[in-house]
Each structure stands twice: as C-alpha cells, then as structure tokens.
Image (tube, rainbow, N blue to C red):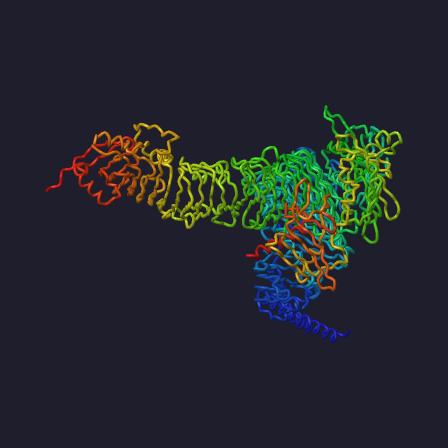
Amino acid sequence: MVEKRTVKMKNRTLPLIIANVVLGLFIFFNIEKEENPKIEFEKNLVRALNSLCTLSFHIPRKDQSIHLERQETDWVISNPIKWPVEPLVLSNFLTKLSHLDSHFLLSVDQLDSRGEVLSDYGFDENSSFFVLEGTSNSLRFSIGNDTRDENYVFLLTEQNKRGETLLIWKASKEILQLMETPYLEWAKQSFINFPLYSIDEITIKQRKDSQKISLIRNQEDWSFTLPFSAKANTEKVNLLLNKLVSQKISGLYSKNLDVNFSTPLYELRIKGLGKTQEISLFEQNNSGIIEVFAHTNTQSHSFLVSDELTELLTEWPQKLRESKLITFNPSKVSRIKVVHDEESLSLRKNIGESWIGLENDGSNSISFDAENQAVQDLLEKLNLIEITNFMFFDPTPKELSENGFEKPEYRLEIEHEDTTRQNVLISKSHQDSSYWKTYVIDQSLVCLVNENWGNLLKTKALGFRKRTLLPSAFLPDCITLAALDHDLGALVTKTPSDGETFERLLDFRVERFIESSFEHEGAWIGGDWVPWKYSLKFERTETETPSSIEFFLSDRLGASTWYAGSKELGIISTLPIHLIDEISDLLKTSSDISP
Amino acid sequence: MNPSEAYKSICQTGRKIRFLLVITIFIQIFFIGISKVSVPVPSFLVNQIVKSFASFTNDVQFTVEGTRLEGFSNLQFSAVNILLGNKPLARIQDFEFVMQPYSITEFFSSPFVAIRYERMDLLFDEKQNPVVKVRDFRLEKISSNHLSMGGTFLLKNHQLDLAGIFATNQKNDDQVNISTVFNTKFLEQSESFASNLANHLAVLPPVHVIGLITGSPNLLQLQLSQVDDLKENSINGVKARFDFEYDDQNKINMNFHANSLILESEFGKFSLLKPSCSGEIIINGDESSFQTISKLDIEKTTVHGSIIGKIPAFSALLKRDQKSSEVLVFSYNKFSKCSLAIRGSSPNLTGEGFIDVEPDQLDLNATLSVGTLKIISGDSLRLRLYENPNPMSSEIALFSIIANNFSALETPAGNFRFIGKVRPDYSILVSNAHGKFGRSEATGTFTQEWSPPNFRFLVKGACFPNDIGNWLGSWWSPIWKNFSFNEFTPLGDFSIAGVWGGEPGNSNTFGVIKAKNFSYRNFQANHATVKVTVDNNATSLRSNQISHTLGTLTGEIYIPLKHKDSPIQLGFDFSGDFPFNAARSIFGHEVENAVSDINASLIQCNGKGEILHKTLNPTDQNQTHFSINLSSEIPLTYKHIPIDSFEGSISRKNGLLEARFPSLSIAGGQGVLSFKELSQESEMLDLKFELKDARRSNFVEILDSMEFQNVYVENHKNIVVKEKMPSKIDEKLDGLIYLSLSAKGPASDPLQFEGSGKFGLSEVEIGNINFLGGIRSRLGSFNLPLPSDALSFNQLDAPFLLDHEILRFENINLSGPLSLLTANGTTNLSKQEVDLIADLKLAGNLKIPLLKQLVNLADPLAKMTSLKISGNWEQPEWKVHLTPPPLP
C-alpha cells in the first residue's frame, strides 16, 4: 500500500519535475545572453580604464619599455626616468584606446581548429605590447602583423589576472602611434610646479656675484627685500613669473649626466602654497655647444632648459623696480608748491575740493581761486612721470652739488593731509638734452627723467585760475546769442525750459585764459586781430533789479578755437569743446530756421 | 511519529511539492507567454515609473506616445516629450527603459538596467531647432556597481562620440539613485549650461571628437581627443580633459589643447597656433561662493582679414570670484613685452601694466580704402597703464603712450606722446596728445567710446595734409591732391568725429586750415583760410578770403559723399577777383578746355553751380547747371578777339547754355552779345550780336583773326597771307563800324550759321581806304567825266543775309555827298571773296529831290553800265559791265 502510494506520488511528481525542468531550460536558453567574449572584453576594458593604476609599454625589439604609474591623483613615469606625466597625453591615449577601431576576429582557442598558430598573426616573444593594470583586472595588448589589406594590425588581448580567453582582433594602425610614443612626449613639459597666483616669494642667487635678490608678494604687490627694500613693479614681476612658470624642458636624458652640481650658475627659489621649489642652473659644454642644465629639488632627474631662462634671471633690480618717480593719492594732497628761480606758485586745498592759489614773482604776490580740475590734471601728470634711468641712491652733498641740486631749476613740494611731504629737485642734465636730473629727496634717489618739467611746472597763475565765468550766486533765466551785425540781431534765446541746452550754457567756462586785453571791437591774439562777431548775454530778468553778464565771441576759428572776451571780467579766453559744440549747434539751428 | 502520521505527512508534503511544481509550471508558461508579448501601458503607470527615478516639479511635464511593455522588463516609448514650463526641453524617439526582469527584490529596489534611445533632440533655440542632438544613446548597468554609457552627441556642428563607465556608490552599490540627479534643477542647469556651451562652441570650427567619460561617486572625468585630425582642418590636434570633483566643494579642472585653430569672424580669419587653455573652478557646496582661475596660451596668431599679419605669443589669465575678477595679459618675446592687468569688479575696476614694442619687428598690416598699409612701424612704442591713484575719481586707469620714430599706417615717422585715462565705461580719453612727424606737429585730444564705438579727434597745429592722409581714409587725400604747399606748412584746427564701422558718412569733420603761399592746380595763393566740413552729405571747403597777387576771392566747393549717390559731382559758389589765367585750371580739365580761348588776367565774378556726374546712359541729359556773373574792365581776348571790357553772365539751365553780355566793348565800340543753346541734342546756337561805333581798323584786325579765316586757311593751304594793317591809322581813314547779326548755327562751326544782319561803316572817307580794293582809285581808273566829290563816299549800309559762309547783300548803299553806289551780290567769308554788281548813281545821294531826278536823267553812266566787283575782298577786280539800253 505504502509502496503503491509512493509509486503514485512518484508518477505524478516526476512529470511535473520534468515539465518544470524542460520549461526552465527553455527559459534559460531563450534569455538573451549577450555575454560573448567580445562584449565581455570591452566591458573589462572600460572597467580597467576606470580604475587604471599602471600603464606600461614594451618594445622588445628595441629593448625599450616605459612604465607609467598612478601616484594618488597624479601619474608619473617610473621608467626609464622618473618624471611627471603630461595629463593630456595620457588622456589622449586612453580616449583613443577606448574608441579604437577594432574588430573581433576569433579567440585563441579557435586557432587549433583553424590549423593556425599565434605566430601566423605576428604574435611572439618579440611582439610589442602594452599593459593596463586596474585595481581589479589587467589587460595586455600585443601588437602583431599588419592585416592582409594593410589597413589594420592584429591585436592580441589577454586578461591576465582572470586568465580568461585570449582574443585576436584587428585594430586601427593608430595603435602603433600610441604604442610608440617616446617617453619625452609622455613627460610633463613644465617643471615649475606653481601656478602664477600661488607664488609668494622668489629669490635668485647668481654665481658671479653671489648676491641674493629676493622679492616678496604682499597681497597683489611685489617688493624687493634683498639686496634693498623698494617697491617692485607688480606687472613686470607678474610677466617674469608667467614666463618662468611657462618654461618648458628642452630635453630629458634617461641617465643623469656627470655635471658639477656644486657651483650652479643661478639658484632660483620659489615659495608658495607652503612649499619651496629650488632650481639650480648649470652650464655644460657639450661638444662645443653650451647647454643649460637644471636640477630641482622636486625631481630626482636633471633636465635641459632653454638658455632664455638664464636671461630671465638677470638684472632683476633694473628690470623689476618700480619706475614711477612719485606716487601719491591726489585726493590726500593738501598743498603743492612749484619754485622756479625767484618765482613760485602755491596751490593750497581750501574747504572741500576747492583750491586757492598764490602767485609770487619775487616781489609781488597775488592770490586767486584755483580751478580744481587744473590742479587735478597737474597731480595726475606728476603721478605718471617715469624714471628713465636710476643714477644713484643716497647721494652725497658733493654729488648733489655736482649734479646741480644746490641751485635746482625747479623745486616741487607736495604736502599731504597727514603733513608728510615729498620734495623733488630738478636740474637740467644738459642744455640740449630732453633729460632732467631729478632728486627725489624722500627716496634719496637721483635719476634721469625724460619729461619736460618746464611745460609741467608753471609758476604763473593763468593756467590755474578758476575757469567758471558766471558767479555762483548769479542765476540767469535767459541766455541770448546775438550777432553783432545789427542786421541780424538776436539769433537764439534760451530759457530754463530748454533743458539740457540751457544747463550746459549755464556752465559757461573757459578752456584756457589768454594773455591779452579786451577791446570793444575784438582782441589781439597771437599777433592776429580777432574781431568779435557774436554776443552771448546771460540775463536775470525775473527779479526786481534785472542784471546781465555779456560775453563777446569771435567767429569759430578752428575746431577747438573759439575766443570769448568779457569787458567786465577783463578776460580773453578760449572756450571748451563742449561749449563750442553747443554754440555751433545753436548757430546752425538759427541759420536753418531763418529764411 | 507512527506510519500513518508519517504517510499523512509524506502525502501532504508530496501534495505541496506537486502543487508547487504545478504553480511553477504555470509561472514558467506565463513567463514564456508574456516575455514575448508587447502590451500597451496606461499613462498613470508611466508617470509612476517616471516619478520613481526622477524628482521633477510641476514645471516639468512629460508626454509620452506609443508606450508598451515588452516582456517584464522592457518599457518602450515611440516618443517622449519633456517640457520645462511651456518650453520644449527634449524630444526623444524610440526610447527604451529596461528594468530588472528576474529579481522581484531588485525590481522594486533598483529597477534600472538600461536606458536606450535612438535619437533625442535637446534644448531648442528661437527657431525651434535643437541645440543638442543625441543619437544611439545607451546607459547600462554592467555590474552591480558599474554603469557604462555610449552615444553620439551633436552640438551645433560638433560631434562627440562618447563612451564611458561610472562606478556607483560602493556603500550602497545597488542603489543607482538617479532621482537625485534627474531633477528640475538639473534640467534647468543643463539647459543653461548647454546654451552657454553651444554659444561658446559656435565660434569654433566643426570638430569631431571622441570622448571617454569615467565616473566615481566623487570624481567625473571627461577626456576628449579629435578624430578627424588632419592638418588641413580648421582645427586639429584637439585634446581636452575635464575633471569634476564633488566633495564639500565642487571643483572643475579643465585642460584644452589644439595644435592649430582657425577662427573666422567679421573681422577676418584668425589662425591660432597651439592654443591651450587650462582652468579651475571651485564652487562651494551651497554655491554661495566660487573661484575661477583659468589661463589661455597661444603661441602665435596669424590674422587674415581687414588686418593681415602675425600677433606674437601671448597668455591671458583670469581669476574671478563672486566679489571681483582679475585679468592678466602677458606677451614676451625679443621685440615686444606686455603685461596688463585689469582688477576689481565693475564699476570699480582698475588697470595697470605696460606694453613695450619695437614696431618695426611687428608684422601687422591693415587693408584700408587707401591700400594695404603696415599698421605700425618704427623704433619704439611704449604704453604704460597706471592704476588711478585717486580713489575719489572713478577712472579705471591712467595711461601714457610714448612712441619714437614711430609711424602708424605708413605716415611719416615721428615722435608721439599721449596721456589719457580709461573711464568707468571703458571709454578712452586722450587728454593730451602731441605728435611731431613729417612736416606736421600737432597737439590734440581723442575720445573713444565703445557702445557704439564713437570716436572724436581734436587736432591742432601744423598739419601737412599728406602726412595724415592714411589715417583719415580715402576721402581725405583727393581733397589735397592738387594742393601744393611750399615751405609753410598749413595750420590746421580739426575736429573729426564718427563711429568706427558705422554707416557710411557717419563721420563729422570740422576744421579750419590757414595756409600761406600755396598753389591749387597752378593757381598761386598768397594766403587763405579754408573751412573744411565733412558731414553726412558732403565734403565742403569754404574760404572767406583767398588772397592772390591780383586780389581776393571767396568761395566754396562741395563734393557730395559717395554713399549719397548724388548726381552732383561738385558744387561751387564763388565771388571776387578771379585770376582767370592763373586759376583757369581749378575747375578741372573740362572747364579749362572750355575756356581755353579766353585770355584774361582778372575777371570780377560771382557765380554758383553744380557740375553733375556723367552718366553711362548716353540718352541722359547732363543737367550740370551754373550761373556766373562776369565783368572786367581789364582788356581780355576771346579767341584772339580783343575785348576791352564786358559785363554779363553765363548760365546753364536745363542742359542749355546761355550767355548775355549787355555790355561789351570791342574795337572801341559798344556792343551787346547774347547766345543760347537751342537744344541738348544738337550744338545749335542762337546768336545775337550788335556792335556800334567800333573802330574800323580794330574791327578789321579782329576779322583777320577770327576763326573762320583759319578754317579757310586749313582748306586752302596755298593762300597768301596778307599783310596786317598798320596798328596806327589816321582817324580820318578809320571810320566807325556798325554790325548786327542775328543768326543760328552750330557752335563748333561759325561758317554754318544762318541769319541776317547789317553792316555799316560811317564817318570815314571810304574812297581813301582800301575797301573793295580802293573804291576811289578803282572808279577813277575808268576816267569817267565826273564832278569832284562824285567819287567821294562816307557812309556804307549793308544789310545782309548770312547763309553759311556766304553773305548775301541785296541792297548795299554806299553813299557820299553826291553819289550813291548801290550794290548787291555775295561775299564768301571763308574765301574772303566778293562778287558784287554795283550801280553808281552820280548825285544819286543829293538830298534835293528835283535836282536828284534831273541828274539821274542826265546820267548816261547809270543807264548804260553796272560795275562788277569780284575776287579777293581786299583787291577785287572792278569791271564795267555794259547794260543794254532799254527797248524803246
């Protein structure tokens, strides 16, 4: 009974099991299996590329091998030299390898069945190969013969660690170029490991004088700290630094040459990012050719550099020193004084931004309201003066006397709001020369300046007089431009309703005062008689006591030459270009309107 | 357990096994059945699936078409559209989403296996064209912690074939949490990034690159290499690498290099040698701050366009954070050094630096309207840019430029010095400029704005026009082509303003030139002040005083600008003492030729007019018009005709020339002359001339010199040139001439005129002059029995008809105190021959009527003979011509 029931159970269960197995097998064999060797290899390749640790190239025929290895995030050449890898060259290799035009041919297992051996494809112990080693897998690529059509080469791939099937491919010949890249191309070309912005200090020591020259950065500005303390020209230093960090190696030898490293030609030390890089330069006579070698503490390998580098390391004091004669903040200047022979002109800051001038011709003094813009222009120009040649520092009284500073032609005093002063003495270097010897007292510096001090340092008030002509309390409500020819009469009348035109005319000012006297019909200017042609009258009519100020204008005698005169003010002057434009427009409008 | 219980237990177990086997069979059959079945999927399910792997806000809308589920795992869409707001973001076709088919746990925890689609158009421009196209994209899970991807990306004209692998988070390796990446913000950022990238890449020539992208949870690396890497390509040797590091702060490292790159723009073609760019962007995790440091290096740039030449190697560094930025530009080689820095943040920028160049070593040329010129040459050019020392003023920088033995655009070399400032809006003001070059030495100012690029020069000083011709373009030099300045260089005071590259004629020039001892087309002037104006319409030269040795002249010449396509070639307006002979050439060769017959030292004139361009169409009428009033008290000649004085006008209107000279003094007489062209098609003239009381001798002299005689000379080479009349003649022998003529004919040939007129001669003893060979002597030779005074004549009236070269006389009356000689016949002007039949009437001129009749009755001569006068008019042959008596 038990047996029968057992058999029954077996009879019903077995078909079910068989049916399940059959269906299971059916499903198993019908599920897409894309895990063929080709796809598997490609997946392994991208895995290897993602976790690549070392890369080595071997050319047995030439007995050459290059090893690259990853050290943390950076790659280095570990053989035949030790040197950082150029990241873009590595990227190029990996990218091209990942997209290599390759076609799977067969696996090595199939060779027997085809009656072939590996050497038929050019694979033997002399085949060039390269190896990619990732953290979890390793791939070896051996390069064989050209394919029959010579468009491809055979490629044998091997997954070493897994010991999986060796596969034969045909691949683009581009892989030969990648394979045979010389180590110098793999090498990083720059050898100074600081971005420009990170350099804080540079020092150079030259063999010939053993003098150390050092510059240090403070914020964006650079200063000499050795052999003297002085401001350096930041842009010149930046140019030097950019040139230094852009320097490239000229060559790398696989073996260090026997160079006398004890007496470097130059010793360059660069500090930044908390690190210090020292570069020593040496000269070596190589078969009559002078080569410049460099050795740096960051690399074990010495290398060749361009002799341009040695040029960059010379004459830093002359090349990099700030060449501006005087530097000051114009808004902090309280007084400026120019002395020339017996004459002098003082300009003193008054309340706010207004200035007062005092002209002294040796016997008489006149004070005047000075034009702020004229003073600012002078201060600006003084700020722009450059030293042409440094002559000497800390001059002796004898040197000062010999250079004409006992009785200088000009004396310039600039007094600042904090009561500090800058004094500059100026004497002509030679009667016919455009150079002036200039002694900056607070810097104890004597130098040559190619600047026409005579044009710049005026002792006459005329150039600094207040240029606005209408009194500030006078507020006209009507401006009339009239032709002095009575037939024509008033040409244009402007009132506040004319907006900007009226406002611009209200700022009636001179461009330049002219030494001439006003006459009713005109004025003598530069030997020419200039008759008045127009009158410009500013009137205040809407008051109990109407008042007016009248100016006479000449014809427009040039693009920027238009003379104005005033009998009341006793002045002759030129008009600024914005007023010339304005009045020209008014005249043009009036002529367009009149029939 | 007893057997029964054991059996029951076995039975129950067996049933369970069989039940399970049956269920398994059903499941397997179901699986087999459904694994090949493709069924439509409701949209709500689709949305659930989308939400499962993407966190989008309501701004993002999905619309899907043709959704089907194939098997358990393959969700397919014929089209997927993604909209961000109302803006289309992506359009995907043949999209396939593959999920875990066999593991229930995996299906719910990490359903993703692969995404594939054939094409996706991503981001659309204004014309709804896709900015990015993706083709054959796949993203697949290749292991529990690796995704591989591949696809082709087309961005503008660039193609990127990308392959890659991503390692997913090791700690939660099965969780590829895509939803943290694919969210609304990601889409917005992608759109912005792709648009910017597309704009930047648009300047690059088309390039096909391959890329390898590798990713780990904290690092994404994209490495690119060019495929079509041929030297003849506009770009070649591209290698690039981008590292994206994710941590507390996100960091992007970028490195780009190309062997060469050709960029084309409206300014020309720029060939860059070995351009390379590297940079680093650091962004804090909360994106509150960032820092960018990037560097561009170019070994050499060759420019082909409006500028041709080479730009030396240069580097540019950019350092930027959310507060400020710094740009440094460097160039260093044997003949140029440059270090410029712009720092700060707008509007508080400052500039510093310098440029030192040996211009002779630079190879940069500009193609201008005046030709291809070297942009700069000379010994040195030094630019210094200084930080504005005055914090109270807003200028970015001050600068100075010093150039020695320097030339810009091949003008004469000289020394220049400029001082100026860069304003907050980057506009430039050169407040103090001084240049000494060639024959010029001038000072001035210059302003340059950038948006639009307005400029304005103010120049004052000794300006030799030829020195600055190359700067001012092709319109300048022609103005001065015909001027010649001697030792005195003109003084100029100019304002030149305009917009670089603006509309033609946008520039405005106003200037005054004072010149001494100069000449214009051989016209020597002592001094002149000339106002030059160039505006949108014309170039105008106006002078109120051009003084020359014979007087002064005011005038204006204006030349419409080319872009105006004006029919006017030149307009003029002048008045004053016009030194005709000296200045005949100033209006050009045509006018000079037209007035070549006039010989006048000085003419008072005022006139204005416009000379129009000749058109290519021969049927177009030349509408050149002018009106010139002329007068002169100084004798002059016209076609060798001496004119003592004249007053009149010449005008041309509607293509017809007309002259009226109401006062004309010729040969001592007073006359009136007018002529006018009758039509534009022909050269027919209507001529009216009347001359009274002209001295006969002078008039004959004029006739001798008149042109038609020359015509005859041309036609009759064998003519014997007769002696000229003596210059001084007894007044009794001279007489006064009256001549009037009204005729029409071609201007070029006086012998083709037709008309009528009258010739008179009076107040002279005609018999004593050699008129018609000497009337008295000729009549006297007939020995006629005539009373005294019968052969005395003192009045000639000869109305005539002009018929080409023939003068026809119907009724010549030659009268004296007694006699009257009447004649008719012809005179050939070109041959100077007469052919007349004359009747001599003795006492025919007696004023006493009865006596006159009687004498005539008694005059047998008049009844029987006529006189035939023929041959050369100076020595004609006189013959008695017998007249038969009238029939009884």
Q: Please state the total of marks drawn on the protein image.
A: 0
In the figure, is residue B38 to the left or right of A249?
left
In the figure, is residue A216 to the left or right of B377?
right
Determine the image quadrant of residue B848. Answer: top left
Determine the image quadrant of residue B826. Answer: top left
Q: Percent x, y for residue A324? A: 79, 40
The residue lying toward the viewer, choosing from A296 and B215, is A296
The residue lying toward the viewer, choosing from A74 and B241, is B241
Q: Which image quarter holds the C terminus of chain B?
A: top left
Furthest-left residue in this view: B888
Q: Percent x, y for residue B460? A: 65, 42
Q: Percent x, y for residue A91? A: 68, 45
Does residue B875 sit above or below B6 in this rendering? above
In the figure, is residue B661 to the left or right of A66?
left
The residue lying toward the viewer, choosing from B847 and B548, is B847
Does residue B579 sit above or below B40 in this rendering? above
Q: Which image quarter holds the N terminus of chain B?
A: bottom right
Is residue B68 visible from the viewing direction of this image?
A: no
In the figure, is residue A303 to the left or right of B272?
right
Q: Percent x, y for residue A419? A: 89, 46
Is residue A516 visible from the viewing direction of this image?
A: yes
